[in-house]
Amino acid sequence: MVNLVTIDRTAQWISGHQEIRMPTPGNGKICYIEIPATDIQRSAEFYRKVFGWQIRKRGNGGTAFDDGVGEVSGTWVLGRPAAETPGPLIYIMVDSVVAAAAAIIATGGEIVQPIGADAPEITARFRDPAGNVLGLYQQPAR
């Protein structure tokens, strides 16, 4: 059984031993993202349900996240306009764009660019509950 504990990085208790997953350091690596939100709890729940992100409380009481592989962390911020029209566009890697798109719709998001618009790449774009537009990317089969 795995029990998640809240610290500034993801920690898991596995068979009585603590495993702390720290991101891979590297010059130029994207490591932290601030996502505009209108309701932090709603945004946190959306990304947890759709992408399996780990949600945690920081030492200052703020809500933070670690992505599905523990390589990128970040937080949601109030008072900043949503990224409704992409400048830099963040893509989230998923096992299946079709399944992720269905989960996005079921969890209160919206698909704004359908699958296939970037063919041969397997992508789509979505709007989260706060209005931010992000992308989905599926690694092609080999």
Image (spheres, grey):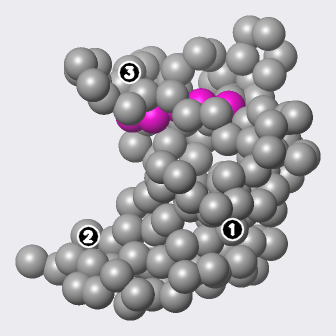
Is residue 28 left or right of 83 when viewed as pictured? left
Q: Which mark is residue 139?
A: 2
- Please tell me which residue is depicted at 45% across the width and 34% down the height of the picture: 72
Residue 142's image quarter? bottom left
Of 59 and 20, nearer the camera is: 59
Vertically, is 67 above or below 121?
above
At horizontal 46% and vertical 68% (from top left) the residue drawn is 136
Of pointers 3 and 2, the one earlier in the residue sequence: 3
User: Whole-Å distance between the Cαs marked 1 and 2?
Assistant: 21 Å
Dot 1 or dot 2: first in sequence order is: 1
Picture disc at residue 74: none
Distance between mark 1 and mark 3 Cα atoms: 29 Å
Q: Main secondary structure of the magenta part?
A: strand
Give the magenta range.
71-75
The quadrant in which residue 70 appears is: top left
Which amino acid is tagged 1?
Answer: Arg
Q: Tell how many labels.
A: 3
| Circle 1 residue | 127
- Give amino acid for label 3: Met
Q: Where in the figure is residue 37, as x and y percent of width and height? A: 81, 45
